[in-house]
Amino acid sequence: MFLHTLFAVFDIWSLQLPTPVALAAVTVIGYMVGRKRRSTQDANDNQARRELKRAQAVARELEKIADLIRRHLATHHASVVRFKNRVVTLGAAQSEGAWQELCQEAEGMLKPTFKLAAQLANAYDEIRQQSNHLMTFTEVRTDPLTGVSNRRALDETLVSMFAMMNRYELPFSVVIFDIDHFKKINDDQGHLYGDSILKSVAKLLADNVRDTDVVTRYGGEEFVIVMPQTPVTGACIFTDRLRQQVEQNLPLTLSGGVAAAVDGDGPQTLLSRADAALYSAKAAGRNRIFYHTGLEIRPTVEADAEPLPESQLDSQAMPPADADHAETHEEPIV
């Protein structure tokens, strides 16, 4: 059937080619089609494995939340039972002192009740956050070339992260990575090779982050990683490790800009500060990581170096328009 289809489309016999040449042409075309199909299948398999890994991490988080709720409810239930028994005992005593004691115990019951209500609200928000992680598995939230999350998934993740930070003061950080000299890679090696580079970088990043981190393709040759429960110090350490991994395993280097969310931040201001740090890393020679403290920009590997003030960003850190810019992440927190 496949051969008949090819003959119908290309009408090879009408070209009056010798039979061996025609058969060879059919063989080559069949091989290329099969190779394309295998390549697509491999990409789908890799994406499915990444999604399964993240789904397993989300399931573990939900299991922990459920276990925590069960333990708190068991403790609260025991308190209610004790209170009920005290009501029966003190009610039989019919003394003023007994009833005053009962009122004090009732007041004591209210405190853990309010605490449990807050814990349940916290658990609800955590479940909502994990549900958002699960939503990023859908096709509309996945970059078709690299298989990592796309800009839409990033926007939704940041909204969720800021909600958790504002309510429970949970820290988180982001890094924007940019492939150094990517325009030159495309010009010299071609866009197909450039696409393979993007896939390789995305895979390396996805394979080396925590299950709870979110790797996204921000656009072009830029990638953003969202790191929950990670202050800026840990984010800088982890980000520089990723930079070294890329340098050691791929024929290219990355520059990165790190920023941690602070009071008054929103998704755009946070990404803008990370982007300013990235520009500084580019201006300083590439293949390095800079971070934004909220007031100034510093290199991660020179903690005692003089900071780069915001006022110098335009003149020193910003490249020309046609330039090539077209834990504790400490131990994993799960």
Image (spheres, helix red, strand yellow):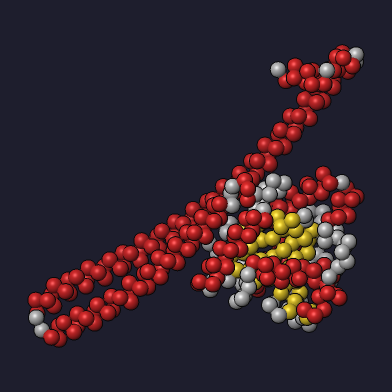
Classify the position of the N terminus by image quarter.
top right
Q: Does residue 332 sit above or below 102 in this rendering?
A: above
Q: In the image, residue 186 lies at what x, y percent?
A: 86, 50
User: Which residue does the image show at 17% across and 71% down from the upper left?
Assistant: 85
User: Which residue does the image show at 83% across and 70% down from the upper left?
Assistant: 318
> Does any portion of residue 43 appear in the rendered image?
yes
Q: Residue extending furthest bottom?
A: 97
Q: In the image, residue 231 lies at what x, y percent?
A: 61, 72
Quarter location, residue 123 = bottom left
Position of 318 compared to 120: left or right?
right
Position of 93 compared to 167: left or right?
left
> Does any portion of residue 330 appear in the rendered image?
no
Position of 198 compared to 92: left or right?
right
User: Which residue does the image show at 40% across and 63% down from the upper left?
Assistant: 68
User: Which residue does the image show at 71% across and 34% down from the upper left?
Assistant: 38
Position of 270 compared to 135: left or right?
right
Q: In the image, residue 36 lies at what x, y percent?
A: 74, 34
